[in-house]
Image (cartoon, rainbow, N blue to C red):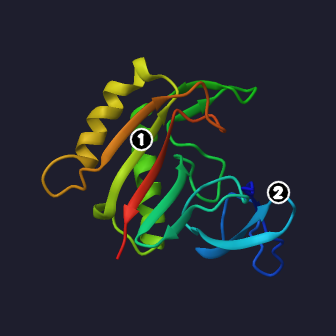
Amino acid sequence: MARRLSLCSLPRTENRLPACPGLQCFQPVVRSAISSDGNEIGKFPGLNSRHHGGFCETISHAKRVGELLFLSGIGPRVRGSKEIPGVTLDSNGNVASYDIETQCRAVFENVRLVLEDAGATWQDIIDVTIFLTDMKKDFPTYNRLYAEYFAGSGKPNPTRTTIEVNALPTPIAIELKVIAAVG
């Protein structure tokens, strides 16, 4: 009989991350695979970056498996603040306007920082999945910037998938999920 697996966080005491934003360091985080009958069947380390501006302490920013480094969805948030570059909120906290170019550049910078914290470089990127909230409006700008950062001589030239989503967890218009090959 096959066992169903679920992932859950192990309790952390002295290694507990503070509430985001503002992670203290790029530290190991251990998650445990639990079978459907409640038995632990393995531990899987992840990494959290001191640079990424993520808002959630329940996910790992990156996880290395063999020669591959998997980054969780990376957005444009500024580390240590609630600021989202390129987003203007109204008095009720709703998005009044946004600049996709500013958000793209901030996301690319956050990806670079997490890669570097994990011992990888921009050149190590082999696959990128992009989530946009408005494909029709934002794709042309995003695609131009993607070519500037990812495509051509001396750039990583990864495989790419671009997906439109209805919404992202915070008021952002773009998020990247990245896989890098590391030695």
Q: Residue at position x 42%, y 57% from top?
A: 179
Q: How many marks?
A: 2
Which one is in front, 172 or 133? 133
Whether tag 1 and tag 2 are in contact, CB under 8 A, the answer is no
Q: Quadrant of residue 72?
A: bottom right
Instruction: Check the image and report above or below for 16 versus 59.
Output: below
Q: Residue at position x 66%, y 38% from top?
A: 169
Whether residue 99 can be seen here: no
In the rendered image, residue 12, in percent from the top left (x then y), is placed at 81, 74
Helix, strand or loop status at disc 2: loop
Camera-nearest label, 1 or 2: 2
Q: Residue furthest front?
A: 1
Q: Disc 1 residue type? A: Cys
Q: Residue furthest right?
A: 37
Instruction: Check the image and report above or below for 83 versus 42.
Output: above
Q: Disc 2 residue type? A: Ser
In the rendered image, residue 29, in percent from the top left (x then y), is placed at 67, 72
In the rendered image, residue 160, in percent from the top left (x then y), is placed at 34, 42
Instruction: Check the image and report above or below for 5 versus 41.
Output: above
Please give left or right for residue 19 compared with residue 52 in the image.
Answer: right
Q: Which residue is mark 1?
A: 104
Q: Residue at position x 52%, y 27% from top?
A: 133
Q: CA distance from mark 1 to mark 2?
A: 40 Å
Which one is in front, 163 or 103? 163
From the image, which quarter does the C terminus lie in? Answer: bottom left
- The residue carrying pointer 1 sits among few (fewer than 14), some (14 to 19) or many (20 or more) residues within 10 Å by Cα, namely many
Which one is in front, 15 or 2? 2
Q: Quadrant of residue 97?
A: top right
Q: Which residue is mark 2?
A: 36
Whether residue 40 can be seen here: yes
In the rendered image, residue 55, in percent from the top left (x then y), is placed at 68, 52
